[in-house]
Structure formats: C-alpha cells, structure tokens
Image: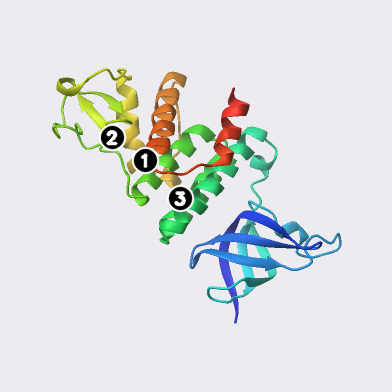
Amino acid sequence: MIEEIEGIIVSETDYGETSKILHLLTKKYGLIGVISKGCKKLKSDLRSVSSKLTYGKFNLFYKENKLSNLISCDVMDSFKNIMLDMEKISYASFLLELASQVAKQNMGNIVYDDLISALKKINEGFDPLVITNIVELKFLDLLGVMPFLDGCVVCKRKTGIATISSYRGGYLCQNHIGNEKIVDEQTIKLLRMFYYVDIDKISKLDIQDKIKYEINKFLDEYYDRYTGLYLKSKSFIKLIEG
C-alpha cells in the first residue's frame, strides 16, 4: 500500500548504476529499507531527497519486512546550517549512525524523537558536542547498560559523590574511591542532568571546556567498555577535533 511515513535517512547504499537503497529511521516503523529507483539520474525527482540527513514525510509503496519503494518526499527541515559546517556534519553523521544501531535493538519512538530533537538543536547553533553527549547518555539506557547515577555505584549512598568511573559503572562516593581521577563537581551534576533533560526544551548551554572534556571522555570510555558498538563516524570526529 502507499503510505506517508515521517522519517530521516540515516544511511544510503548505491544500488546498480542509477539507484540507491536508503536506510530510513521512521517514527512509526523504526528502521526500514527503501529503494529509490533512478535517483542518481540528473533529472530524477528523487535525486535531491535520496541522501543521508534528508528529513521529511516519505511517500512510500510500503512493504512490511521487505524493501519499500520511494515515490516522493516532502522535506520538513533541510538542516541547512548543519550542511554548511564540517564540524556539525561530522556530529550529525555520528548521531545518525548511533541512532540506527540503537534502533536495531530498541524499536521505540524514543530513538527517533531524540535524534530529530538533537539535530534541530545542532542546526540552531547549540554546541554539537554537548548535544551529542546528551543523546549518547540517553541511548545507554535504551541499550540496557546505563551507568548508575542515583548515588554511589558501590554503596548506593547519595551524598558525598566524588567522581565518576567508567570501569566501575557510575558514580563513586568518597568512601569508595580507588585510583580513579577526581572530576569536577559540575561534571557530576551535569552528567545526571543530561539524562533527565528534555532536548526540545534546551534554551541555553554554557559549559566550561574542562567539564565538556570530562563528560565526553567518560562517555567515550563507557561506550567502548559496555556497548560493543564501533562507529566509524566517531573516529572522524576525533580526527577533526584533534
């Protein structure tokens, strides 16, 4: 049947000389495969809407558990500010890759909603690293490997939290610190806030570079240790950030 489905293209693969297979993350069906026939032809109406980061309402000849066929797409947001900035593009690409991996394991709307909200905030000019870290933390919960942020991971004490450990899986209080590096108090506070914040409602981000570094370092180590995900786009971010 022909159906209008809201979604975003998270990746694309060439198919033959003139077509592409698009991997579409949708609000309704999760991750689906779509063939865009003839979209690589210069005069094709599908050419401009068959690339990664295209976000809109896709008119599809939908086939459950099979490749659907793209008929047309009404673009909802072109993310033009992202497309003009290499740093923003690199973070957006990482979020698309991450969301597609998480969606394979969790089909809920949360993945889609958080991804779109994050891309909109990056497009509006908010710090792409901070927005990305917020999404990364929220997705850890969906992956079933959320760090313990409700108190000390060892004794569950809620006061006297001194640092965060990727190795030990969460916050540590003063009584259970080993050789872990002590992080800033703001790092501890913001990490918990990142999990609970509604991305759509973010209106200001004013975070010191030191705090951003400590949060990002923790999340990088935690993902490496507990998720088993290897994302090529993350390596590119590290390369351009130096």
Tell me residue 54's x, y (percent): 65, 55
The residue identified by callout 3 is 114
Element type where label 2 sits in the image: loop
Q: Name which residue type carries label 3.
A: Asp
The residue identified by callout 2 is 169
Foreground residue, 42 or 63?
Answer: 63
Nearer to us: label 1 or label 3: 1
The residue identified by callout 1 is 226
Residue ID at (15%, 35%)? 156
Label 3, label 2: how many angstroms apart (C-alpha)? 24 Å
Residue ID at (27%, 17%)? 179
**Which quarter of the rendered picture does the C terminus lie within?**
top right
Residue 119, picture quadrant: top right
Residue 25 as seen in the image, left or right of residue 207: right
Which mark, residue 107?
A: none
Element type where label 3 sits in the image: helix
